[in-house]
Image (tube, rainbow, N blue to C red):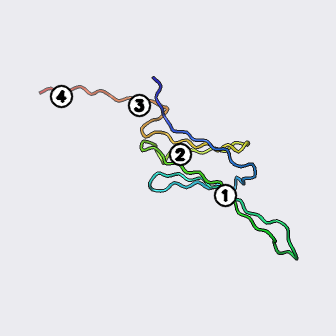
Amino acid sequence: MMRIRSFVRSWTLPEDANPEALRTELNDKGQLTIEAPKTGTSGSKKNIPIFYHYRSFVRSWTLPEDANPEALRTELNDKGQLTIEAPKIGTSGSKKNIPICPAQRH
């Protein structure tokens, strides 16, 4: 039986998204929000923009209750794929030996 050790979500950002403008935020209720705003102007008349636009890529995801918010990892590849991994609480890649102590005799 395979045990799930982490929760993973991936999103593909729009091609014109600016990686430097990418923001992630985790609130106290475990909701993770990803936002990639994009602003710009088109055309000008005497150095005054004629058209101003604002777009935003926004995704929200509520972490499962057994996810460890302190261990969140993010990765953005060169194709615009953003991956977020939230390990489960109490899971790690290593094992821990627990010593067995002899019972005390009375």
| Lower position in the chain sequence, tag 1 or tag 2 | 1
Between the residue at mark 1 and the residue at mark 3, the CA separation in whole angstroms equals: 45 Å
- Mark 4 or 1: the one toward you: 1
Q: Which residue is mark 4?
A: 104
Label 4 neighbour load within 10 Å: few <14, some 14-19, many 20+: few
Instruction: Residue 44: give its label.
Output: none
Amino acid carrying mark 2 in the image: Leu
| Lower position in the chain sequence, tag 4 or tag 3 | 3
Between the residue at mark 1 and the residue at mark 2, the CA separation in whole angstroms equals: 23 Å
Q: Is residue 23 left or right of residue 14?
A: left
Write the residue at 72% across / 54% down. Answer: 18
Q: Which residue is mark 2?
A: 72
| Lower position in the chain sequence, tag 2 or tag 4 | 2
Q: Position of residue 73 (x, y in %)?
A: 57, 44
- Say how many tags the image has: 4
Amino acid carrying mark 3 in the image: Lys
| Lower position in the chain sequence, tag 1 or tag 3 | 1
Between the residue at mark 4 and the residue at mark 1, the CA separation in whole angstroms equals: 66 Å
| Lower position in the chain sequence, tag 4 or tag 1 | 1
Write the residue at 60% across / 45% down. Answer: 74
- Mark 4 or 3: the one toward you: 3
Between the residue at mark 3 and the residue at mark 2, the CA separation in whole angstroms equals: 22 Å
Amino acid carrying mark 4 in the image: Gln
